[in-house]
Each structure stands twice: as C-alpha cells, then as structure tokens.
Amino acid sequence: AAPRRLFSGSHSDFDTVRTAVPDSAEGVQALIKEQVEANPVMLYMKGTPAQPQCGFSQQVCRILHATGVEFSSVNVLEDDTMREGVKKYSEWPTIPQLYVGGEFVGGCDIVTEAFQSGELDESFKAAGVKDA
C-alpha cells in the first residue's frame, strides 16, 4: 500500500514560489512585477501558508483559504532583499501584502475588511479567479 500523505488542506498550487533572487534592486523589482503579473492571487508573507510565521500572515492565509481561491505565496523571511523589495514595490510598509489580478489589495487589516464587506470576492471575480 502507498504511504499515507498528510495534507495541509492546500492544493499543490498553494506551494511557495521559489525563485533565485536577483542581486540588484532593479532585478528584485522586476522579479516581484513578474510574480504579481503571473499569479492571479499573490501573497507576500512571513512564513508559508502551511506554517505562517506571524499572526497577520496567518490571518490573510485563513481568509484566502475561507474564500476557496488558489493563491501563490513568497516567504519574505527567506530573503531580506525580497522583504524590502516588496515594500518598495507596493509603497506599503508592512507584510503581508496581497495582490489580486496584478493589483495591490493591501495588508492584513485591509484584506480583512475587504473580506468582511464582500469587496475581496468582487476582486477575485474581476480577476477571473472566482465564478460570479
């Protein structure tokens, strides 16, 4: 019999995006732009969806799991240049940061409010990642 696998409740599409980080600030910005544009729902967080390393990142993951959308993520704790680069890219000082359809949604508080108001679902529908 095949070994029994334990699942975190996440599809393999939820796995952390692992990419070599460029040496230059411009290269980091280009990488972030590429990730945000290539992934309909992109989360920059501390830790991973299976093991968040801060409560705010955990909260945004819970919201995304509750909505049922698939998302990609980057653990900014793995590389300081990515951590600082994403703050510069969005002009937003904190992590986590959520992007939907290439657009910056916000951090934990904004994502939580958008989830509660239904705006987050509307963003997902507009980005084509959730049925209308």
Image (cartoon, rainbow, N blue to C red):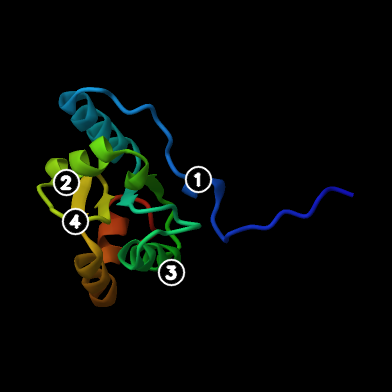
User: Could you classify mark 3 by the number of other residues whose Cα lies within 10 Å: few (under 14), some (14-19), or many (20 or more)?
Assistant: few
Task: Give percent across and percent down for residue 38.
Answer: 33, 36
Residue behind mark 2:
87
Label 2 – label 1 distance at C-alpha:
24 Å
Dot label at residue 66: 3
- Front residue of 49/34: it is 49
User: What amino acid type is highlighted by mark number 3?
Assistant: Ala
Residue behind mark 1:
13
Task: Give percent across and percent down for residue 10.
Answer: 54, 56
- Looking at marks 2 and 3 on the same chain, the residue that comes earlier in the sequence is marked by 3
- Looking at marks 4 and 1 on the same chain, the residue that comes earlier in the sequence is marked by 1
Label 2 – label 3 distance at C-alpha:
26 Å
Choose mark 2 or mark 3, whichever is in front.
2
Residue behind mark 4:
94
**In contact (CB < 8 Å): disc 2 and disc 3:** no
Label 2 – label 4 distance at C-alpha:
7 Å
Residue placed farthest to the right in the image? 1
- Looking at marks 2 and 1 on the same chain, the residue that comes earlier in the sequence is marked by 1
User: What amino acid type is highlighted by mark number 1?
Assistant: Asp
Dot label at residue 123: none
Rendered image quadrant of residue 118: bottom left
Q: Secondary structure at mark 2?
A: helix
